Image: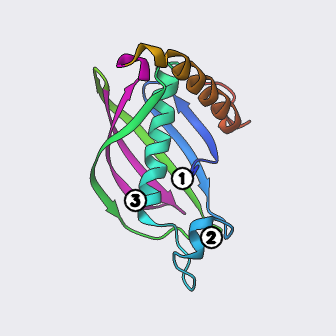
Amino acid sequence: MHFTLIDQIIELQPGKLITAIKSVTLTEDYLRDHFPLFPVMPGVLMLEAMYQASAWLLRITDDFSHSMVLLDEAKTIKYAGFVRPGQRLELTSDLQKRAESLSWFKAKGVVDGEVVVSGRLVLRQFNLADTDVEQATTDAYICRSLRDQFSALNSSTLATIT
């Protein structure tokens, strides 16, 4: 199962930072089991949301030139609170450094002004055609699909990319 954990991008500075929103609702599939009497967003999905925000920043920074942006490392992840249905998780990711196919980010998630998750992420970007030239068509298809997804996330309040 694939979880899309970014509902909206509200700020974007390519090569620098992104701010995105995940509004948690009681209809989220994972809340049926986590936990029925005390539904909260699982910590691993809070981490996934930070990764997804960071990946969007990297895709925009590189003008969707890589079909694959994967989480390579998650370091110093700290959980300091819960995200419950009806709450809005505001995710911020700052691009710290880049070298070859790796990018380093400092990310956090905030609910009602309080940091509930934070950490450092390392993302790896590449194309499938890097190892199999016959995959170039697949890379192009994935990149087009990601551009379409980004258009849907691009909020009306995000007038321009700065």
Q: Residue at x 37, y 17 (%)?
A: 130
Q: Position of residue 4 (x, y in %)?
A: 58, 49
* Label 2: few (<14), some (14–19) or many (≥20) C-alpha neighbours in 10 Å: some
Badge 2 element: loop
Q: Position of residue 131 (x, y in %)?
A: 35, 19
Determine whether label 2 and label 1 are within 8 Å by CB.
Answer: no
Q: Residue at x 63, y 29 (%)?
A: 145
N-term mark: 2 or 3: 2
Task: Tell me how far mark 3 sits from mark 1, CA to CA.
Answer: 10 Å
Amino acid type, label 3: Val
Does 113 appear in magenta?
yes
Q: Quadrant of the N terminus?
A: bottom right
Q: Residue at x 54, y 82 (%)?
A: 38
Badge 3 element: strand
Does 51 appear in magenta?
no
Q: Residue furthest front?
A: 134
Q: Nearer the viewer, residue 82 or 48?
A: 48
The residue that mark 1 highlights is 90
The residue that mark 2 highlights is 85
Determine whether label 2 and label 3 are within 8 Å by CB.
Answer: no
N-term mark: 3 or 1: 1
Q: Quadrant of the C terminus?
A: top right
Q: Which SS type dominates the magenta stretch?
A: strand
The residue that mark 3 highlights is 117
Task: Tell me how far mark 2 sits from mark 3, CA to CA.
Answer: 16 Å
Left or right: 118 as drawn, with respect to 151? left
Foreground mark, 2 or 1? 2
Badge 1 element: strand
Q: Looking at the image, can residue 93 be seen?
A: yes
Left or right: 88 as drawn, with respect to 118? right
Q: Which residues are magenta?
A: 102-131
Amino acid type, label 2: Pro
